Image: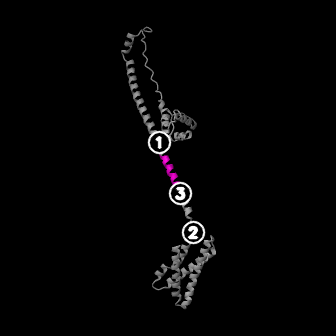
């Protein structure tokens, strides 16, 4: 409110001084003083009535229009005086906007009053905002923890799969070399004579054939087969059985270790949720 009050006082004094100086040369100065006080008084009266209506939660467009009319009249007087003044037109024009500016400040103050809140309401709003920030931070931390857990699990599975693939590749290479050696021996020139010297003939002039072993596709590694996901009911039953396998009941850490050692698979979030449900 203080900027609006200060701007109003300055504009009223300036309007009164300009009216007395400008009209005082053409009419008696008491008349000019009355004219200046009339402009300022009308403007101030409409402003006071507007403030009273605002305090009651009401508003009158007519009173507002009259107030703006007095403000425009005061501004017009200042502009006319600035245009007729000799040698200082720019200086008077620089202050001619003060009445309209004071009216605009009162308008802003009225808007501020209509949106003002009590300290209790402001404290409640701050509490709600802080609670929302806390929940968002906890949700982000939970998502980051889940992402790190899943990344660790995928890294372990990938490394195990890579080790198995290297072993299978090395085994396949060894078998390939052995197969090549067997095939070379089978197709050699001295193979038939060697077999004839150590085996009996089945039919005349026919040497028993030496068949190579069958080398079929390798069996898949069971550890890398995708295990079906456990339902919540099955997971709760397994967690409860492992937890109650000893007396007193196992802690979550021991239960989780035995759960994974038994070959079961479940994410940390689902396993902890099952623990909470059964415990």
Q: Element type at marker 2?
A: helix
Instruction: Please say which color scheme the image uses.
Output: one colour
User: Is the residue under label 1 in contact with that under label 3 (CB below 8 Å)?
Assistant: no
Looking at the rendered image, the disc whose residue lies closer to the viewer, 3 or 1, is: 3
Q: Is residue 199 left or right of residue 135?
A: left
Residue at image location 55% in from the left, 87% down from the top:
33
Vertical relation: 279 (above or below) 80: above
Residue at image location 43% in from the left, 34% down from the top:
160
Residue situated in front as seen by the camera: 2 or 220: 2
Tell me where residue 230 sits by quadrant. top right
Residue at image location 49% in from the left, 49% down from the top:
140
Give x and y (percent) for residue 236.
56, 37
Q: Earlier in the sequence, mark 2 or mark 1?
A: 2
Give x and y (percent) for residue 89.
47, 82
Give x and y (percent) for residue 144.
47, 46
Q: Give the residue number, with chain letter if any, for mark 3.
A: 129
Vertical relation: 134 (above or below) 172: below
The residues colored magenta run 126-144
Q: Is residue 130 left or right of residue 50?
A: left
Disc 2 packing (10 Å; few <14; some 14–19; many ≥20)? few
Q: Give the residue number, with chain letter if any, for mark 1.
A: 149
Q: Give the residue number, with chain letter if any, for mark 2.
A: 113
Locate the C terminus and report the quarter of the image it occupies.
top right
Q: Element type at marker 3?
A: helix
Q: Is residue 49 visible?
A: yes
């Amino acid at each position: 409110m203080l900027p609006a009050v200060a701007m109003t006082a300055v504009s009223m004094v300036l309007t009164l001084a300009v009216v007395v100086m400008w009209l005082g040369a053409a009419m008696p100065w008491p008349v000019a003083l009355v004219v200046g006080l009339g402009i300022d008084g009308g403007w101030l009266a409409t402003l006071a009535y507007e403030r009273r209506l605002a305090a009651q939660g009401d508003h009158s467009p007519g009173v507002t229009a009259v107030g703006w009319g007095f403000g425009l009249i005061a501004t017009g007087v200042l502009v006319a005086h600035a245009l007729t003044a000799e040698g200082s037109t720019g200086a008077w024009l620089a202050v001619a906007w003060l009445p309209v500016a004071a009216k605009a400040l009162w308008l802003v103050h009225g808007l501020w009053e209509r949106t003002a809140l009590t300290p209790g309401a402001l404290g409640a709003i701050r509490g709600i905002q802080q609670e929302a920030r806390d929940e968002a931070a906890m949700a982000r931390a939970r998502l980051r923890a889940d992402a790190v857990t899943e990344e660790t699990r995928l890294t372990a599975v990938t490394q195990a799969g890579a080790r198995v693939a290297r072993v299978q590749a090395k085994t396949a290479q060894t078998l390939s070399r052995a197969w090549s050696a067997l095939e070379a021996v089978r197709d050699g020139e001295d193979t038939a004579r060697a077999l004839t010297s150590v085996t009996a003939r089945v039919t005349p002039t026919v040497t028993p054939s030496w068949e190579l072993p069958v080398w079929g596709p390798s069996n898949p590694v069971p550890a890398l087969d995708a295990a079906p996901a456990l339902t919540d009911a099955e997971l709760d039953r397994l967690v409860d059985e492992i937890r109650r396998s000893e007396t007193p009941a196992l802690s979550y850490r021991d239960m989780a270790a035995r759960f994974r050692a038994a070959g079961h698979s479940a994410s940390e979030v689902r396993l902890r949720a099952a623990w909470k449900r059964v415990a």
